[in-house]
Amino acid sequence: MTLTPDPTEPWAAPVATAALEAVVDVPGSKSLTNRSLVLAALASEPTQLRSPLHSRDSALMVEALRVLGVGVDAVDADGRPDPEGPDLLVDPAPLRGGGHVDCGLAGTVMRFVPALACLADGPVTFDGDPRARQRPMGPLVDALRDLGAQVDDDGRGALPFTVHGTVALPGGAVEVDASASSQFVSALLLPAARFAAGIELSVTGPVPSLPHVAMTVDALRQRGVRVDVEPGAGTPARWTVHPGPISGGIVAVEPDLSNAGPFLAAALAVGGRVRVPGWPTTTTQAGDRLRDLLARMGAEVTLGPEGLTVSGTGTIAGLDEDLHDVGELTPTLAALCALAEGPSRLRGVAHLRGHETDRLAALVTEINRLGGHAEETEDGLAISPRPLHGARVETYHDHRMATFAAIIGLRVPGVEVVDVATTAKTLPDFPGMWTAMLAGSRTPAGRR
Ligand SMILES: O=C(O)C1=C[C@@H](OP(=O)(O)O)[C@@H](O)[C@H](O)C1
Ligand SMILES: C=C(OP(=O)(O)O)C(=O)O
């Protein structure tokens, strides 16, 4: 059993004393879990999610659906009620207004659920953590209004606001500027099969994290929804979702490949080998790009029936890469860059300034606090090699800043992580998983 760290005390990141030889079972994907929950709520029959994520972000989504009147219950693998069961059974119902949704700091909840609430039978209020009120929302709210929804906010185009659900939404052609977050596109596509005319969505600028939009399209198609994607200059120009029913049934959730990142990065930082079982052979998850990115930083990467195995020597090459498509991986890669032999440039990630914290500012501050040399560029980071030293690392309520610090702490004695419990946003027991990885013991990590 792992003891829950005292939230008032920083966590002493463990230093690795030997090459790694670990198998790490990573819990379900946040992005797949929360899309599956939303689509299950709109489906014409129940859905059983197999091995979804159980973490703060998924719990917020489950609670949001319950507020809207949808039944969500923990079940065992056979679908029988079991409060400790690994699966979730979603029983769709006509969406109910009158409630309040707490978005926490979950981008998927604050972007996906308001679009859903347009189909409720009354007003739904939304708010979240203090930082959630600063995360970009405006273009999505404008697009919902263009589609016929009534949204009352305080004029800032941000949380808190009220969506006045009217059971049905006309839908049709609409434009959105999704340069601040791909989640605006996903939010508009997910419920669109239930809009009277579906949606014809165009974007007015570049969209980051396009694999996440592909994931949304894939999730819709898997549930029988017709989606047409018209390519534009380097980015899809238009998505058309046709109106129609959404199917349910059994939906298996892949492990979270972005959350596998810190564990795989550990093999590079320390040397040795880390294997993540259940790595899909085809996937829309952005984390799959780790295979080529870690290889370019010096890892040997093998994908087979046993999962993904990453081996390293402890020597890391710098990285020069545009991460616009996979911005979510930036903090993990930045930790490796800070430990690398040569300089790195991480580009195309200006939108990270609107994530859980301003991640560009946070990474620069914390790398420099550890003795490194990092600078913010217009759209990313420049990191040069320097000998690092221990420090108390701030995490700014950002799960990926905590895992960033843990990677550096593997090699640098005296790294203390403030509020390591913030990792519970997407990983239920990160400190326990990390310790087990270092001990070489395999635990059913993070599963409940
Ligand atoms: O749709 C999703 O599940 C996500 C989309 C991406 O958001 P942005 O496009 O805002 O970066 C990603 O970074 C986030 O972690 C999850
Ligand atoms: C940006 C992230 O989360 P969110 O879904 O809250 O946007 C993330 O997990 O890196």
Image (cartoon, grey):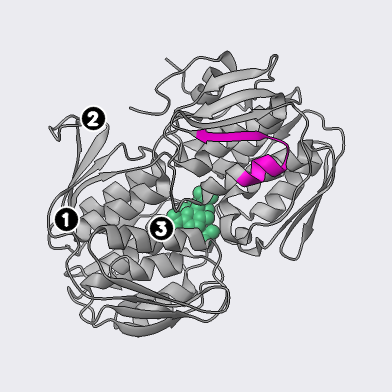
Q: Which residue is mark 1?
A: 69
The stretch of residues the image draws in magenta is 292-303
Q: What's the distance in space between the residues labelled 1 and 2, CA to CA?
A: 22 Å
Question: What amino acid does circle 3 point to?
Answer: Met
Q: What's the distance in space between the residues labelled 3 and 1, CA to CA?
A: 26 Å
Mark before the other along the chain sequence, 1 or 2: 1
Where residue 260 appears, as percent x and y from the top left, is 52, 36
Q: Which residue is mark 3?
A: 215
In the picture shown, does residue 412 fall above or below 116?
A: above
Q: Secondary structure at mark 2?
A: loop
Where residue 93 appears, as percent x and y from the top left, is 12, 58
Asked whether 41 falls inside the magenta stretch, the response is no
Which of pointers 3 and 1 indicates the residue nearer the eye? Answer: 3
Q: Which residue is mark 2?
A: 85
Q: Is mark 3 within 8 Å of ligand 1?
A: yes
Q: How many marks?
A: 3
In contact (CB < 8 Å): disc 1 and disc 2: no
